[in-house]
């Protein structure tokens, strides 16, 4: 029988989609107040993997990833997704989102995304939210599953997430070496 233990804290990551750079800046201001300092910010990348958001959000869309210095407990993800949904709603115009915020986290072995949609590979977390293991860590980098979204399968996205994971691993080692 295994002993219960508290899960390790994880690295909070947001994948943000928007057309207007001002929306990235506005969202980031809120995030800093809510979650602390940003420790990684990717460049804005062209998002051309699907037309799913085109009618609602316009075109061309950009994606940016950010992560935060402060590690979070993994069980905090549903509450974070509720907050990002609220930002999406508050910035909407005429019932259409102008920004899409995908919160998730990275730990040693995986990249998790929060979602409101259930499916066979998603686990219910509570508060109407599910977790999807979008990528898994193997030897030298994140790897995709059959269900991984096309953009998250790309080398460009995985390189960014690998870099964020690298920072997380260093941070965990420092924390552990300091008696944490």
Image: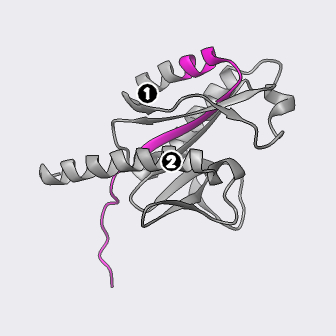
Image quadrant occupied by the N terminus: bottom left
Q: Which residue is mark 2?
A: 159
Query: In the figure, is residue 166 to the left or right of 128?
Result: left
Q: In what element is the residue under mark 2?
A: helix
Q: Assess disc 1: are there few (<14), some (14-19) or many (≥20) residues with their C-alpha within 10 Å of its C-alpha.
A: few
Residue range of the region highlighted in magenta in the rendering: 1-27
Callout 2: few (<14), some (14-19), or many (20+) C-alpha neighbours within 10 Å? few
Question: Left or right: where does residue 78 sit relative to residue 154?
Answer: left
Residue 9 or 161: which is nearer the viewer? 161
**Mark 1, residue position:** 34
Which residue is rendered at x = 40% and y = 50% of the image?
165
Residue 16 inside the magenta-drawn segment: yes
What is the CA distance from the residue labelled 2 to the residue labelled 1? 27 Å
> Percent x, y for residue 15?
58, 38
Residue 10 x/y as whole percent: 38, 50
Instruction: Give the quarter of the image for residue 85.
Output: top right
Sequence-wise, the earlier of marks 2 and 1 is 1
Q: Is residue 127 magenta?
A: no
Q: Residue 128, position in %: x, y?
A: 64, 50
Along the viewing direction, whichever of 100 and 149 lies nearer the viewer: 149
Residue at 42%, 67% (x, y): give it.
139
């Amino acid at each position: 029988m295994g002993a219960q233990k508290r899960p390790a804290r994880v690295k909070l990551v947001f994948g943000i989609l928007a057309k207007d750079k001002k929306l990235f800046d506005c969202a980031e201001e809120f995030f800093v107040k809510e979650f602390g300092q940003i420790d990684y910010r990717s460049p804005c990348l062209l998002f051309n993997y699907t037309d799913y958001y085109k009618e609602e959000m316009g075109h061309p869309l950009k994606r940016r990833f950010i992560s935060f210095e402060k590690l979070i407990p993994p069980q905090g993800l549903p509450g974070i997704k509720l907050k990002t949904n609220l930002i999406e709603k508050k910035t909407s115009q005429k019932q259409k989102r102008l920004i899409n915020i995908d919160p998730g986290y990275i730990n040693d072995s995986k990249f998790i995304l929060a979602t409101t949609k259930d499916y066979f590979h998603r686990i219910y977390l509570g508060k109407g939210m599910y977790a999807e293991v979008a990528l898994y860590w193997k030897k030298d980098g994140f790897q995709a599953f059959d269900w991984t979204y096309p953009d998250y399968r790309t080398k460009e996205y995985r390189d960014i997430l690998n870099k964020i994971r690298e920072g997380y691993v260093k941070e965990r080692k420092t924390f552990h070496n300091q008696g944490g």
